[in-house]
Image (spheres, rainbow, N blue to C red):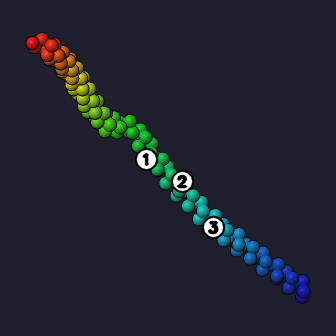
Amino acid sequence: MPKIKNLLQKLCTVEDCIREISSLNKGLKDLATNVAAIDKELHSVKNYVAVILSNVKEIFAEQFNPFKTYVEEQLKMLSYSLSKQSRTLKILKEQAVKVEEECLASAFLIP
């Protein structure tokens, strides 16, 4: 009788182990399903990133180049204007020196 009881106890232990293995198996299947879903989503995101990266140069050129051209044109205009004003200022300074010299010279000529 003790042998049968011992065998029954071992059988219960084996059954418990089988249930645990079955539960682990289900958990592994769920994990595999989740990993497959994540993998699918990663591939989808990877495709979106690839599309964006392939179009970045075009998007940049379309959006930035017109702005860059506008700024360069404005800078050229400012540079031209500053150069012109610089030349005008130089001429005015030369004229002021000349007038000052003439005034000093005429001051000495007055009797």
In terms of depth relative to the viewer, which is nearer, 9 or 55? Answer: 55
- Residue 100 lies, in percent from the top left, at 18, 18
Alpha-carbon span between mark 1 and mark 3: 32 Å
Q: Is residue 49 left or right of residue 9?
A: left
- Mark 2, residue position: 39
Amino acid type of the residue that numbered disc 2 sits on in the rendered structure = Asp
In terms of depth relative to the viewer, which is nearer, 27 or 89? Answer: 89
In the rendered image of this protein, does residue 97 appear above or below residue 70?
A: above
Which label lies toward us, 2 or 1? 1
Question: Which residue is rendered at x = 90% and y = 86% of the image?
Answer: 2
Q: Within 10 angstroms of label 3, few (less than 14), some, or many (20 or more) residues?
A: few
- Mark 1, residue position: 48
Place residue 51 in its image quadrant. top left
In the rendered image of this protein, does residue 98 appear above or below residue 43?
A: above
In the rendered image of this protein, does residue 66 appear above or below residue 36?
A: above
Ranked by sequence position, the earlier of labels 2 and 3 is 3
Q: Which mark is residue 27?
A: 3
